Amino acid sequence: MPDAGNAAAVRPLVFHPQHARSELARRLRSAVEGAVLFDAASRGRYSTDASIYQVEPVGVLVPRNDADVRAAFDVCRDLGVPMLPRGAGSSQCGQTVGAALVIDHSVHLDRVVAFDADARTITVEPGIVLDKLNAWLRPHGLWFPVDVSTAAQCTLGGMAGNNSCGSRSIAFGNMVHNVVAIDALLSDGTAARFGPEAAMRGGGPRIRTLVDGLRAIGERERAEIEARVPTVLRRVGGYNIDVFHPRSERPYTPDGSVNLAHLLVGSEGTLAWTRTLTLELAPLPQHRTLGVVNFPTLHRAMACTRAIVGLKPSAVELVDRTMIELARSNPAFRPMIDAALIGAPDAILLVEFIGDTADIPARQLDDLCALMGDLGLPDSVVRMTAAAPQRALWEVRKAGLNIMMSMRGDGKPVSFIEDCAVPLEHLADYVDRLSAVFRKHGTRGTWYAHASVGTLHVRPILDMRRDGAVRMRAIAEEAGALVREYKGAFSGEHGDGLVRSEWVAWQFGPRLTRAFEEIKALFDPAGLMNPGKIVRPSRMDDTTLFRYPPGYRAEPVATALDWSAWDVRSDPVTGTVSAPGTGGDPTRGFGKAVEMCNNNGNCRKFDAGTMCPSYRVTRDEQHVTRGRANTLRLALSGQLDAGLASASVRDALDLCVGCKGCRRECPTGVDMAKMKIEFQYHWQRVHGLSLRERVIAWLPRWAPWAARLSWLANLRERLPGAARLLQAGTGLSSQRSLPRWRRDTFAPVQPGGPTTGRVDVVLFVDTFTHYFEPENAYAALAVLQAAGYTVAIARADAGDATPSRPLCCGRTFLAAGLVDEAKHEARRVVAALAPHVASGAVVIGLEPSCLLSFRDEFLVMGLGDEAQRLSEHAMLLEEFLAREHGAGRLRLPLVALPESHALLHGHCHQKAFDAVSPARTVLQLIPGLTVDVIESGCCGMAGSFGYDAAHFDVSMRMAELSLLPAVRNAEAATLIVADGTSCRHQVADGTRASGAREAVHVARVLVRALAPTAPPAVV
Ligand SMILES: Cc1cc2nc3c(=O)[nH]c(=O)nc-3n(C[C@H](O)[C@H](O)[C@H](O)COP(=O)(O)OP(=O)(O)OC[C@H]3O[C@@H](n4cnc5c(N)ncnc54)[C@H](O)[C@@H]3O)c2cc1C
Ligand code: SF4
Ligand code: SF4
């Protein structure tokens, strides 16, 4: 048992009388400009972070400015309500959950306040995200070098709160080594700049009393500080009382003087609110080399680390065998990790060297190779000197935890001893002995991360719904004994929060624990700042604070889609996963799929990738994949009153455009697009559908009539005022043009092509292409035939009830949650294509969202083996042509076009299925054509989403993030290529006012480039 001193087992302050909550909300609303969120769903979304805990906050404030925070402090102080500052909420230990008013600074408080290039300092508001800050600094040749793995999400305020540390801490230190000053607000309303102690003595009486009090504690506890505070670089538990008597391997200040901002760093929001931070910057490293050392055993890797650190690298990072295998099982990571391997190592160390001139890191890399020879491992180093493979491998390493969390079943890797730090000479023994502890307790751990500083991440797999709490404590106690024996730190990176504050007394002893309480009382006498963290903690295994307490169970749900792949059990030791559908989940796996979200916040992205477009424009926790998954989880487990088909869930999913960005980019594979279909199914069964939703959903059924009466169907575009009338009646935005119905729908002269006998390919012409843009299908047919393939057109099976109606994938039904109707359409497709698939033909489609549903949604509709086989034969036109080209089989006679440049915009589903690069490959076959891919997320149209008047604004803002500016800036002679019909529509609508641009399907570019000698198409 940890020696919890006299502070143990005191529960966090709990504040929830309903009348006080209403009073707080009322007063806040009249005092602040920012959002005041007190509804159950919002509080639920802020009740978790990346830890195992869940505590409902009193309410949430999203301040617009500093004045809002001050006003909130005044109101909270008046009512005695605790306050909890929060950034991205990516803490792993429960720092940001509590029964308090959560103040989320990540939305609006993210400005750069001051910058001094010569002094290499910058002052920022707490909500600025690290990647954004570093992007801002790049043109100045500078960076903030505390490079945490969550750089794309974490805020500087949160980094300071946790005393965060990056992979390169051995060279640059932790947050505490890089913060110069903090402008803070105390809970009593006092504002002060925390910096050098001497300067602070010139402050007002409140601050002088504070500084004197702190100094007195520091002097009094000198001996205890020396006896109890570990000397390792990575020690982030407790308060940094060692500012007064430095213990860190790396001094906090160059001259050993006391800077009281360093006491706030790592204080987890328990002492003061950080209003701005002044940071020390470093020059951007000019040259880097990476040596990847391959080891036959993990023990050997750890035993060699100390010698490697002697070479003065900027980072030494461990990746073990399990992590290597998990990374190799992910198609996106496999090539990156394979490039680093020699044979099948048990562990690798990524050893990085940096320097201002190229020769320094190059020489150090040579030294590494020589050292490994001396240590008996010659030829064990993969030398990576080019930037691209280095970057790629760092991405794999940074994704470490997330790769590990993709494990299905109730057993999950749990953070509680994941960041213990031990001196390097003991690292190998520590790993061996802790692994034995895991075995003893019937679990295992995967090892990775910061070998350079003795901080290895390891998370034993535990099932918190069953016996996880008991085993967690037992393992923590044995791990703690090892850390003590090796004179290490119990927390070397992630902090205390709810999981480790109990261990503060164990680490620092009763005297320093009391000193910490005194420090807390000096700053925050009323105990209003993030209570229950660092001092006066709860127990780590208090199951009432767990997100998944023992007995946690979701309510039964009769799902429309097949989620059985998630309804499994996994063995914590062997990793064996039981058969789909055997996990005993009353939601048939749907709940388990939702619970794959571990709240790490990776979806709070702004720049890279696609995920999550709605968050990028609203920055609202409700509109990010994490917020949606949390809302669903709460609804499914009966924690939101009205359950799954409730308005809270609808609101959270309303702006989800079903782009599938999360399906690909969420590290644990949360597939919100599919979850939205499931939700829509339940919603429409309870609440029905609006007229607009019904009209759009049933489009495939009434389309033949609209085509025949196209003059009538297109009337809205010609009659003045009709668009507005239609908006009033249906909610279809009057600001949108509508697709033009065609009388000349797709009808090739030889309708089926050579339908008898075996064909090479079957062209699936979707509803949108058929009725609105048949020229795309003609183009594709011509291109395929010019390349010498025999083509059949996909048509309904002769036994079909409506054989003359074109085939349709059913997407419009799916989007409305009409899953039964979508299944009907899907069955027609599967039946019609089965004979072709059986004969080995490739099924080719043009519209990404239609064709790719054969490889996605069709597989969760219970359509049987034929659907599975179809999915294996279904390709987009560009995927097929690129494959044939790669295999050396493509004979497509192409000539140069008048245009020499094309801009390619990938449809979200193309991106989700890695199908953008084939489009680029194929376009590049056109002589003289350079192709650039627009680094864009969702175009904002997303099927019918952008046609809805209520979504028009968000839709356009999504498009304005990158797609529309890129199109507007393109030369008039540049081709704009987009394979999605809605993307093309968005380009047309979004450029109408500024010189209309037309985007075209890749097939239409190719058909124009066909050599005149190409055989005429049989159309
Ligand atoms: C997958 C994954 C990888 C991670 N990798 C790393 C890593 O490499 N290195 C590392 O150190 N950590 C890592 N973490 C932990 C976490 O991401 C970092 O600690 C991060 O810096 C926290 O930033 P945040 O904005 O999410 O802060 P939050 O989690 O929102 O807050 C962190 C703490 O700071 C306090 N705080 C926030 N804002 C203020 C303010 N304005 N005033 C006072 N206190 C405030 C909060 O109350 C809380 O106690 C990782 C987490 C995950 C999930
Ligand atoms: S949805 Fe995925 S990326 Fe977002 S927090 Fe959950 S697990 Fe992380
Ligand atoms: S499908 Fe797209 S919009 Fe919806 S949650 Fe996923 S990334 Fe966000």
Image: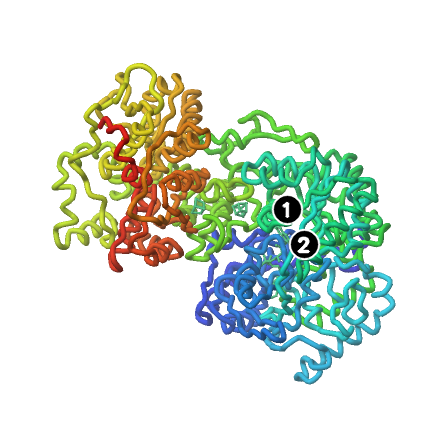
User: Residue 167's mark?
Assistant: 2
Taking the view exactly as shown, the residue that stands out farthest to the front is: 1013
Q: Nearer the viewer, residue 120 or 259?
A: 120
How packed mark 2 is, by other alpha carbons closer than 10 Å (few <14, some 14-19, many 20 or more), is many
Amino acid type, label 1? Arg
Relative horizontal placement of residue 442, taking residue 130 as reference (left or right):
right
How packed mark 1 is, by other alpha carbons closer than 10 Å (few <14, some 14-19, many 20 or more), is many
User: Residue 397's mark?
Assistant: 1
Taking the view exactly as shown, the residue that stands out farthest to the top is: 757
> Is there CB contact under 8 Å for labels 1 and 2?
yes
Could you say whether the residue bearing mark 2 is in a helix, strand or loop?
loop
Q: Nearer the viewer, residue 847 or 572?
A: 847
Q: Can I make out residue 72 in this image? A: yes
Q: Position of residue 122 (x, y in %)?
A: 59, 71
Could you say whether the residue bearing mark 1 is in a helix, strand or loop?
helix
Total number of numbered discs in the rendering: 2
Amino acid type, label 2? Ser
Quadrant housing residue 177: bottom right
Q: Which residue is painted at 57% across and 45% down in the image? A: 598
Q: Is mark 2 within 8 Å of ligand 1?
A: yes
Answer with mark 1 or mark 2, whichever residue precedes in sequence. 2
Query: Mark 1 and mark 2: span between their CA atoms?
Result: 10 Å
Q: Which residue is painted at 45% across and 63% down in the image? A: 35
